[in-house]
Amino acid sequence: MCSPRFFRVEYEINPWMDTGVPVDADLAVKQWERLRETLVELGHTVHTLDPDPALPDMVFAANGAFTVDGVAYGARFRFPQRGAEAAAHRAFYAAHGWPYTEPVEINEGEGDFAYLPGVAGGLILAGYGFRTAPPAHAEAVEVLGRPIVPLRLTDPRFYHLDTALAALDDHTIAYYPGAFSEASQRVLHRLFPDAVLADEADALDFGLNLVSDGRHVVLNGDAAALATKLAAAGFTPVPVELTELKKGGGSVKCCVAELRPPPPTTTDPPTPR
Ligand code: ARG
């Protein structure tokens, strides 16, 4: 995660951003701190990057890379205003000894990649249409060695995959079908017939921009209707207020880059002869 100490809306690169609307940076920091504490209370380890005053969107840490099994596939941002964020993430992975691949293709990290470890040996769902370039999907396959399902986003309000779809546990997703092309909707329905379906209002509440540990689902407090659907599906919703960051076009998930470490090596005793 990265503190929104320098968060501002000083350019418009998605339909949620309006440079004419004032942002309360102190409130943004308070709300973000509450999100961080919530994740810690749920038992997660949270690392933070130092915010850079020249990078007002750096709070949206999910966009900095995508990791699977201890390997990081770096980001290359679509818009120059965010370009320098990638190096800060790269430095984090280098400092922590993670293999890191610098991408050739434009991709915005976990903003456009979701991971389902329990499907097909580890399935990546990948968005395109607004930010991530389709060739990045093939590049990610080569770096991460996992199958990828490309999904076309068609509604500019849901410009990143993580505004329209979320992994709830190893094999379950929630998504808003209307954010995807008809063919992509069919693909999602075939792969995930038991998904939690969100409607347009849930998606506009940024409800799908969530972080789940498989049981607790941390999501934007505005998304009460989606919280009810998640509870009915057996999950425990944990609402947090992030009104200020919504002005930048992001919520819970955008603030969190998930670190997926290597699987534990099995220490089975040698087979007796
Ligand atoms: N203002 C940022 C942008 O438009 C918001 C990024 C939100 N991040 C996300 N993972 N959806 O790039």
Image (cartoon, rainbow, N blue to C red):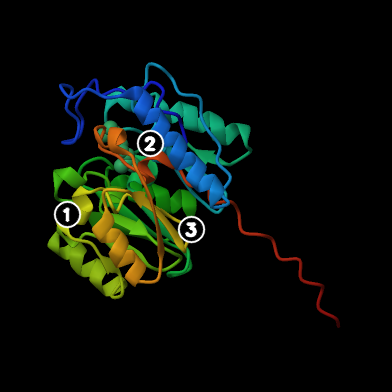
How many angstroms separate mark 3 from mark 2 (CA)? Answer: 31 Å
From the viewer's perspective, is the residue at label 1 or at label 3 nearer? 1
Left or right of 268? Residue 154 is left
> Disc 2 marks which amino acid?
Val
First reached walking from the N terminus: tag 1 or tag 3: 1
Q: Position of residue 11 (x, y in %)?
A: 22, 22
Secondary structure beneath dot 2 equals loop
> Disc 1 marks which amino acid?
Ala
Disc 1 to disc 3: CB gap under 8 Å: no
Secondary structure beneath dot 1 equals helix
**Quarter for ligand 1?**
top left
Examine the rendering and report whether any part of residue 170 can be seen: yes
Examine the rendering and report whether any part of residue 7 can be seen: no
Q: Residue at x 38, y 21 (%)?
A: 6
How many other residues sit within 10 Å of disc 1, few (<14), some (14-19) or many (≥20)? Answer: few
95, above or below 203, in the image: above
Where does label 2 land, which residue? 104
From the viewer's perspective, is the residue at label 3 or at label 2 nearer? 3
Label for residue 201?
Answer: 1
Label 1 CB-ligand 1 distance < 8 A: no
Q: Residue at x 43, y 69 (%)?
A: 119
> Disc 3 marks which amino acid?
Asp
Residue lying at the far top of the rendered structure: 54
Where does label 3 land, which residue? 213
